Amino acid sequence: MLTYTLRRLLVAIPTLLLISLVIFLLVDLAPGSPASEIPLTVPPEVKAKMIEAMGINEPVHIRYLLWLKQFFWTEPLYAIDAAFGTNYADGAPRIISYSSKVPVMDYIGERLPQTLIVIGTAYVVAILIALPIGIYSAYRQYSWFDQVGTFVSMVGYSVPTFFTGLLAIIIFTTWLGWFPSIYNTSLEVVDWETFKQQVRQMFLPVAVLALFNAAELSRYTRSAMLENLSQDYARTARAKGLSERTVVLKHVLRNSMIPVITVITLGLPAVFAGAIVTEQVFKINGIGAALIGAIHVNDLPVVQTIAFITAILIVLFNLVADILYGILDPRIRYD
Amino acid sequence: MTDATAAPAILDREDAPRSLWRDVWDQFRMHRGATIGLWVLASLLIFVLIGPLFWTAEPIKVNPNTAEMFKSRNLSPSWSNPLGTDQVGRDIMARLMLGGKVSLAVGFVAMAVAVFLGTLIGLLSGYFRRLDGALMRLTDLFLSLPLLPLILVLTFLYGPALKEAFGPNLGTFFILIMAIGLTSWMHVARIVRGQVLAVKEREFVLAARSIGTPARRIISRHILPNVLAPVMVAAALGVANAIITESVVSFLGQGFQSDFSTWGSMLNSAYYNQTYPMQMVWPGLAISLTVLSVNYVGDGLRDALDPRIRGR
């Protein structure tokens, strides 16, 4: 198991490097360069100095390597310094946002928690809803529960999150007035009252995201369970006299989990996409809103870093999926 | 002559030879959701394509007479404006028709780009073992990319150059289909590769190869027709995905300009005009209905093309 994990980890490193190259080049080679943002009234020699200070007169490969060094060496050093009060970084240049002039990592560090709290809660809620529904609809195929569940999950999967979000705002905020439609990021949970407020403001975005993800997950759970329920080993387990509960929840479920885990982990990019939209709809001051804002003002370092951090998270979860496969199905480990 | 007289008698019989597509169509019609989905999709297409011939209200230009324009803003539904008017007095139904045309066009063309790329890469990596490793690594790489952020970045950074070259609307159209097509071919490629790997070992391919058929003709004549079924299912689901992505990008303000209408940009402008929530219900409903019916059609196609299910 350890060698299997290590091997997967080693495969992830070149993938990450390639992704970083793609993201860097895509943003860097675009026609709208930051140099075009400098006002025309600035004299040419000052402009040349500004371009030099921004470091955009170097050749592409040097800038890419510098960016990599900053990302994987300088920034972690600063993180260690901040955590332990040491001074390893020694004032090395950090990745700086063009528009706000603060280090990008600090900026993202302020935004990431909101996003992760909302996405994380929504995903956990989605899994908790989807698995039982998927299992039960497969077990009672063509029952009314299955029919209703399949239809609802098809609708939930087809209706885009921005529309469900807007509908939720119209119904629950405008008409009923139960939940606020705007997420207050500066709210700090200190006592019971603020905790209730936090739950109330999280309810709508989490519900919208969870509905969408649960719909997709329950569809896959149902079809995976259906496939395994009719297998010979399920019949053998029943013939041995095992209880229905053990057959379904132990034998069949465990074998059905492999495609479901693929969907859970590979669905992560879609979850981030959904998060960008829900952050826009509910005005959550998270990483998606930061990305949109940075794109609007041509803030390339922020755009690159956010895109790359999202990619790291995706690769990380793919790794988790691979390790979970190894746990669920021992044959995969020796492949 | 004998054939012509005998043919009707054979066709009437229960065990007459039937073409594959006839079987598929019969099975497709058994799927209730898919049939309803096809009808809904057809009515939506009629609405956006033929509707403008009968409903000639102006969808884009604002009334130049400012006093009249102000009087016609945000009207509730009436006989002259069945779905009301928007925040600058344009008829919402006419905008829905135009918006639907654009959204569906982006959806279908972007899907075509994605399916073409995916099929090409899948065929190459399945058939030529030397290319397999590299192409599949590329596919995995694309699967790990954060797609929506990249599409937003692509449309923002590369959009202006294309808009300059082709005009604002056509330029946006090109950048959207390129961005969506380039980021959604991976599933098709994986499916096609898997099918090609299986088909390539069959006897008829061996027979074709043994009489000296060149690789490109084996691929186009013998392998491609046998991998088409899953590609069609993936294409149907790809249309749904492309329509959603287009509307997300437009909703986030990176797609078509808000005066030109697509369903996503209509939702975007309605979002900033929240006193009249019905204005966002119509485009939202249109997107949801389209995607729902396309998904059902895809489901029905998958069942109809699956020989294990067909004929039961």
Image (spheres, coloured by chain):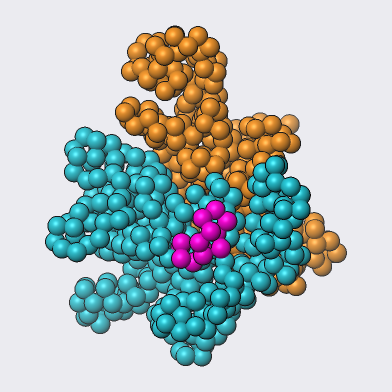
What is the quadrant of residue B163 in the picture? top right
Read off the magenta span: A96-108
| Relative image position of residue B129 (x, y in whole percent) | 73, 72
Is residue A84 placed above or below A15 in the rendered structure? below
Q: Residue furthest left?
A: A192
Instruction: Tell me if residue A81 can be seen.
Output: yes
What is the quadrant of residue B177 in the picture? top right
The residue sitting at 37% across, 70% down in the picture is A256
In the image, is residue B227 part of the stretch drawn in magenta? no
Nearer to me, A247 or B265: B265
Nearer to me, A221 or A320: A320
| Relative image position of residue B84 (x, y in whole percent) | 38, 19
Q: Which chain is cyan?
A: A
Task: Using residue A239 as the reference point, say whether residue A107 is left or right of it.
Answer: right
Nearer to me, B8 or A89: A89
* Chain B painted colour: orange
Q: Quadrant of the N terminus of chain B?
A: top right
